[in-house]
Amino acid sequence: MISYERFRQEVMNRIKSYLPENYAGWKVCMETEYKVNQTLDCLTLIPPEKRKLTAVPKFYMQEYYKVFLNGTSADFILRMIASKIVSAPSPEEVEKSGFDILRFQDDVVVQLVHRFRNHVFLKSVPHRPFLDLAVIYRIMVFDEKGRWAGAIVNHTMLNAMGITEEELFEKAYRHTPEALPFKMMDTREMLLCNLQEQSREMLMLTNESEQFGAAAMLYPEQLNAACEKLGGSIYIFPGSMHELYIVREEPENLGFYRQMVADANRDVVDETEWLSDQVYRYNTKIGKVRVAL
């Protein structure tokens, strides 16, 4: 089995031989793209007169290498990529259709990501620190069936909006509970790491869409409701970027909770959805989330 590095180079070297002659002058580019929890190799073909990468299809080599490892031939993968390049709208068509960010600037929500794991990615987007995490901003537009599409707000989008990061935060913070209403559920009936032996009650806090629900950690009213339900100060640990698990504060069990979070993140949580290995603490008197010590 060939290595990933060799596979990537083979795709770069051979892709133009699978394309029509009118692509002979196009430039094959391999760029590094930083996404949440990921560093990806992105293949693009750029027309001779173009310099921007935004109006051409992008192909992430790590994804295609997984397909290759599952038994698909390199020849088939190259034909598949070539077919998508040929069938995609031309750069001119994409640029002509345009994307007016101002149409969607009110559809922005907050999202939490890990600050240190994503330190390079965060350079490209407006954000603000929150403990070991960072708040970023995502446009989410829903259709009548509840399906959504969107994109993370980058600096170019923010400049087009003509607002500051502070104003963006205020807009997104207000809109998030409207677009993604939070919900809290009792999980005592669920078997999670034998947790019933350690705590009488456990809550899961997310939102109706179960997308980026860990942002509930930014909303004291949600955490106050959990404190009231559990009868005191609470520990919070992220299941992923999409949900939080909450138990009553029990210092004698903190080590157990930390190990449980680390084990779940290593064995269960998809790397792209990982948020943190930390356990957090909250009480109504302080009204702020802290790392549990």
Image (cartoon, helix red, strand yellow):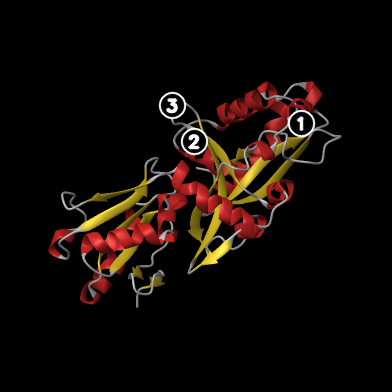
Residue identified by numbered label 3: 145
**Depth order, front residue of 261/242:** 242
Tell me the residue at 33%/52% (across/down).
205
Q: How far apart are marks 1 and 2 (CA)?
A: 31 Å
Check whether the beta carbons of the residues at disc 1 and disc 2 lie within 8 A of each other: no
In x, y percent, where is residue 242? 40, 49
**Depth order, front residue of 267/148:** 148
Residue type at mark 3: give it: Lys
Q: How far apart are marks 1 and 3 (CA)?
A: 29 Å
Q: Which residue lies furthest to the left in this view?
A: 197
Disc 1 versus disc 2: nearer the observer:
1
Residue type at mark 1: give it: Glu
Mark 2 surroundings within 10 Å by alpha-carbon count, few (fewer than 14), some (14 through 19), many (20 or more): some
Residue identified by numbered label 2: 67
Residue type at mark 2: give it: Val
**Depth order, front residue of 274/84:** 274
In x, y percent, where is residue 165? 64, 58
**Depth order, front residue of 185/91:** 185
In x, y percent, where is residue 252? 21, 76
Name the secondary structure under disc 3.
loop
Q: Is residue 170 left or right of residue 21?
A: left
Q: Answer whether residue 53 is visible to the viewer in this image.
A: yes
In x, y percent, where is residue 281? 34, 70
